[in-house]
Image: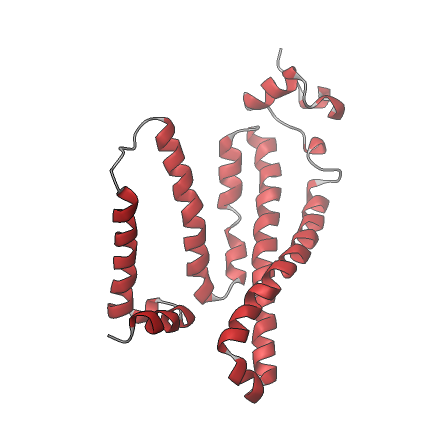
Amino acid sequence: MPLRPEDINPNDVFTPEFITHAFKGGNIPCRLMHDHTCEYDAILRFIKIFKAAFKFYAPIHLIPVIIFKLKRIKKQPWKVIKGYLKNVFQSCMFLSVYMTILKYGMCIFRNLLGNRPLSILLAGVISFPGMFFEAPGRRTEMSLYFLSPFLESVWRWLDKRGYPVNIPNGEVYLFCTCVAIIMYCYERHPDTIKSTYRSLLSKLWGDD
């Protein structure tokens, strides 16, 4: 007989019955995942993630300022500092909103659909509003950042089913293809490359 959510004891979540229940897509009560209501937990999670994100993004955004904007700091210190703080705030808001909606969405869809991969997928789909807090120029970068683990997941899914074919020295061909794409964009469509990256590439490859 399948377990009912109200019959699950928080102290017995690792029993064989519970593990079987979870793997078969059974509903896992939110009270086992967090102590408060889903809404209150989302607020607490937002605050926690924002604080952690600030510790991460503050030095990340400071590095380009030190490398590329030292001269501008002397001439326009307030403008540089204001832009730096704005970038840090936008990045912190992106990560906080994204993770909060994702976790809250998992609560919603897990209660509606049970403990299934579709619940996580739908939660990921509705988490996109966080992207709008980032600067337009960084949205493309973030999309490419998320594309990498997505492709890795697809590859692992295909690999488990034996679809990929081993190509000798395939990583060399892949690297050459990626560099060729970058070189093409650098030569023909330089505006598609962020100015800081374009400046770095110009030092490596020159203007021609």
Question: Which quadrant of the rendered structure holds the C terminus?
Answer: bottom left
Residue 99: x and y in percent read 59, 49
Above or below, 64 relative to 107: below
Residue drawn at the location 48% of the way across and 76% of the way down: 68
In the image, farthest residue toward the top = 1
| Residue 193 location, quadrant | bottom left
Residue drawn at the location 51% of the way across and 43% of the way down: 124
Residue drawn at the location 56% of the way across and 61% of the way down: 91
| Residue 79 location, quadrant | bottom right
Q: Nearer the viewer, residue 42 or 72?
A: 72
Above or below, 89 relative to 12: below
Residue 106: x and y in percent read 58, 38
| Residue 167 location, quadrant | top left
Residue 190: x and y in percent read 31, 70
Residue drawn at the location 68% of the way across and 18% of the way down: 15
Residue 158 falls left or right of residue 68: left
Residue 100 falls left or right of residue 179: right
